[in-house]
Amino acid sequence: MANTEDKAPNKENVSSWKDSIYNPRTGELMGRTASSWALILLFYLVFYCFLAGLFALTMWVLLFTLDDYVPRYRDRVPNPGLVIRPNSLDISFNKSDPQKYAQYVQHLERFLERYNDSVQDKNEDCVSGTFYLQDGPKEMVRKSCPFKRASLGFCSGLSDTNFGYHEGKPCVLLKMNRIIGLKPGGEPFINCTVKKDNPIQIYYSPNNGKIDRMFFPYYGKKAHENYLQPLVAVKLLITKEDYNKELTVECRVDGSDLRNNDERDKFLGRVTFRVKVVE
């Protein structure tokens, strides 16, 4: 008798659990009838379609206000940053092992391919020392001034395909970020200093590190498709006494009204990197 009484509640519990999923007497699935489930699914379908439509409308209005040629708001970046190539702020290599500096050489070579004569000969010769102003509607395609890699001298990769790394005198290339409409005052040039007691001789090219005004202003990616920033090559003439030492180099844009001393932005008009040559 005791066993029979124990089994009856167990059967009821199993039946109650199954009915909570599907009740054959009422036709309910998980406590809802088919019509109730249909109404819920219809509600969420309409609700999410409304959200998707609202999002699409918002994006359409946003994109409608954008200009394909000139950003609407440009007041937050009035001054350009300064960047280096190869794209590393820690340049460390063994000058006797080509495998150790191959990544830097390959990076520079790939970067300079756009400055080959075969590409730059398509551009128009400009008057050095003056802004290349091209007035007209914003949709007008602007012409670009040529900047040929041969002007980088020893750092062009033409006469020395290793960019000086094999002799422990590495080259780095510097360029300013693009800013639409920028016309720097004065005569901007790159000036680098090595933070150590005994100065290191530095070779600049072209024109001793000067950035020609004819490459300004920039009119935007769509209107100025062939534009490339002018480069300044910096060759560090590191001597044997400075091998196996980490040298900190700071380069700035001087000679103009461009900011280079903002403590809140260490890349505004300047860049700091480290170089270590191992013999």
Image (cartoon, rainbow, N blue to C red):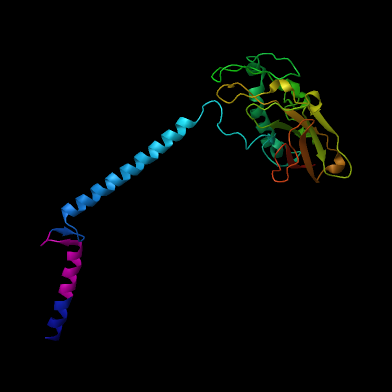
Location of residue 73 with respect to 244 vertically, above or below: above
In the rendering, at what x and y percent does residue 202 appear? Answer: 83, 33
Nearer the observer, 235 or 195: 195
In the rendering, at what x and y percent does residue 83 appear? Answer: 69, 35
| Magenta residue check for 249 | no
For residue 36, say whether it is visible: yes
Nearer the observer, 59 or 166: 59
Q: Position of 37 compared to 238: left or right?
A: left
Q: Position of 52 compared to 249: left or right?
A: left
Nearer the observer, 74 or 167: 74
| Magenta residue check for 17 | yes
The segment highlighted magenta reads 10-26
In the rendering, at what x and y percent does residue 41 appear? Answer: 24, 49
Residue depicted at x 88% and y 45%: 197
- Residue farthest bottom in this picture: 1
Q: Label the magenta part by its dominant secondary structure.
A: helix
Residue depicted at x 63% and y 18%: 119
Residue depicted at x 83% and y 37%: 238
For residue 95, say whether it is visible: no
Q: Position of 143 compared to 156: left or right?
A: left
